[in-house]
Image: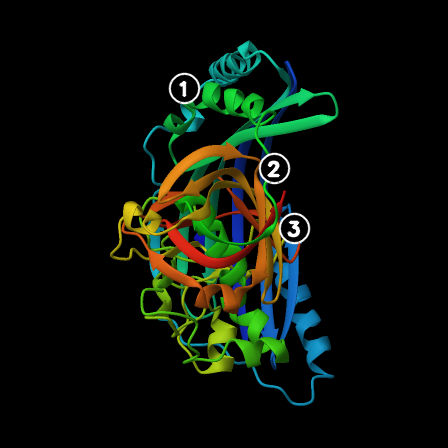
């Protein structure tokens, strides 16, 4: 029996207001190096499914590994929803209308990682690790390579049936150097949709990371305070994802009174040069897909235009509850979780300036690149750069120790006074929310300049 027949039969005779089924198959490979040797090889395969049902605005959810359990799981999810609905004070089921689709979506493949042998993947990772350790002064290294394929069959009671497959590859390489108690690190993260080729030809990049880690031991720490800061496309992309993107997820907004006050449509955030977008319809990226995990077609959603909040990210439920259009942002990391509102590819649109324009007039500033993590709490943010360089009299000069950027998002956006025209994307990260991580995403931005940005030693 086909997945379509299984889903259609299981949904026949359901008693919920709405019901959906996801059946999934997945395969993944992960290599982890710690120090000079391969620490772990993890190869996994999974198969299972999930049912989500809604009754009077209350949701029931059930996951399973045996497809024979599907009919009983439809009943279980419906019973859960009905039990919860008995105490929800007459709430009704609200889902934005989405035209039913029947479609089969093939994966985007450039160089299929599934066709590369484990021996070859390990050989190449060994090679990169050898390059790291050729650099004098290195005391440790970390290499992670992973690829994953996920094939999903989705059907719902609106008449949608979709089969969709995605293949991801990701790589993280870092080197650590030590001088007494002083430890410094440098590295990079990259990812691709359906392309093992991202893992090839990295010799120069790996060697440069190891050399940079050692060089940071001699770099001076920077005195904290407010300075003009220029962010490269990698760090600026992480900034818009973490500091702004999560505030654009509609489930965060309508469930939180403070965020409703902060994130209202029409709010002015900064100059006309600020334009933010999210969308899985951006082709060829790790956050890209044709349909989300509710069967809603992907889109490109304007979030900020000319400095003004014009949009946010939605599931069908949040769209209905806010009276806005669904955006195709309901995502689940796998069948063990229900879909929730998540970013896809979040980026700052190009401005009109050049990188040299951003440098012009900066007498004592900092150029920051790459990232080593961060955190946000509503409108407050903190991010660590991976690299930092002094800017004096409009020129990038010597490296300094990586710095930490922190502040209030809205004040910081007011201080973004220039946006370059050189947008780049990074696909080496993963997003976490609601216990579901790392979800594949993309981030992007051109160089941006921020005046009066608070920095401190990382």
Residue 451 lies, in percent from the top left, at: 45, 59
Q: Which mark is residue 64?
A: 3
Q: Earlier in the sequence, mark 3 or mark 2?
A: 3
- The residue lying toward the viewer, choosing from 257 and 239, is 239
Q: Earlier in the sequence, mark 3 or mark 1?
A: 3
SS category of the residue bearing label 2: loop
Q: Residues within 10 Å of mark 3 (few under 14, many from 20)?
A: some
- Left or right of 299? Residue 443 is right
- The residue lying toward the viewer, choosing from 374 and 152, is 374
Disc 2: which residue: 221
Residue 232 quadrant: top left
Residue 138 lies, in percent from the top left, at: 61, 17
SS category of the residue bearing label 1: helix
Disc 1: which residue: 204
- Left or right of 79? Residue 296 is left
- The residue lying toward the viewer, choosing from 210 and 345, is 210
Q: Residues within 10 Å of mark 2 (few under 14, many from 20)?
A: some
The C terminus sits in image quarter: top right
Q: Is residue 322 above or below residue 169?
A: below
Residue 304 quadrant: bottom left
Q: Are marks 3 and 1 in contact (CB under 8 Å)?
A: no
Residue 147 lies, in percent from the top left, at: 50, 32
Q: Earlier in the sequence, mark 2 or mark 1?
A: 1
Q: Which numbered disc, 2 or 1, marks the residue closer to the eye? A: 2
């Amino acid at each position: 029996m086909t997945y379509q027949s299984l889903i259609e039969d299981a949904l026949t005779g359901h008693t919920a207001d709405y019901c959906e089924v996801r059946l999934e198959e997945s395969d993944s490979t992960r290599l982890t190096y710690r120090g000079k040797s391969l620490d772990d090889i993890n190869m996994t395969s999974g198969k299972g499914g999930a049912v989500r049902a809604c009754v009077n605005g209350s949701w029931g959810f059930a996951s399973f590994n045996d497809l024979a359990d599907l009919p009983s799981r439809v009943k279980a999810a419906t019973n859960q929803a009905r039990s919860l609905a008995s105490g929800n004070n007459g709430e009704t089921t609200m889902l934005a209308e989405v035209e039913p689709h029947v479609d089969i979506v093939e994966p985007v493949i450039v160089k299929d990682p599934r066709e590369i042998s484990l021996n070859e993947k390990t050989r190449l990772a060994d090679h990169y690790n050898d390059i790291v350790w050729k650099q004098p002064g290195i005391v440790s290294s970390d290499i992670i390579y992973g690829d994953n394929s996920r094939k999903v069959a989705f059907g719902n009671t609106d008449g949608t049936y979709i089969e969709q497959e995605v293949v991801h590859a990701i790589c993280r390489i870092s080197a650590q150097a030590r001088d007494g108690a002083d430890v410094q690190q440098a590295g990079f993260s990259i990812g691709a949709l359906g392309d093992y080729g991202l893992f090839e030809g990295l010799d120069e990049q790996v060697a440069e990371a190891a050399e940079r880690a050692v060089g940071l031991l001699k770099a001076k720490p920077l005195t904290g305070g407010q300075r003009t800061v220029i962010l490269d496309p990698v760090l600026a992309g992480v900034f818009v994802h973490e500091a702004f993107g999560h505030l654009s997820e509609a489930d965060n907004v309508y469930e939180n009174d403070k965020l409703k006050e902060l994130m209202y449509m029409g709010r002015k955030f900064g100059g006309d040069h600020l334009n933010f977008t999210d969308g899985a319809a951006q082709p060829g990226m790790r956050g890209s897909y044709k349909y989300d995990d509710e069967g809603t077609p992907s889109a490109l959603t304007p979030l900020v235009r000319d400095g003004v909040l014009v949009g946010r990210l939605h599931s069908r439920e949040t769209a209905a509850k806010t009276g806005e259009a669904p955006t195709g942002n309901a995502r689940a990391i796998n069948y063990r979780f229900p879909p929730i509102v998540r970013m896809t590819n979040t980026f700052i649109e190009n401005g009109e300036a050049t990188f040299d324009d951003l440098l012009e007039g900066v007498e004592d500033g900092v150029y920051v690149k790459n990232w080593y993590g961060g955190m946000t709490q509503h409108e407050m943010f903190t991010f660590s750069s991976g690299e930092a360089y002094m800017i004096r009299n409009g020129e990038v000069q010597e490296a300094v120790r990586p710095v930490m950027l922190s502040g209030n998002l809205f004040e910081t956006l007011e201080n973004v006074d220039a946006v370059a025209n050189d947008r780049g994307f990074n696909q080496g990260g993963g997003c976490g929310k609601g216990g579901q991580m790392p979800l594949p995403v993309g981030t992007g931005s051109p160089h941006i300049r921020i005046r009066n940005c608070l920095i401190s030693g990382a």
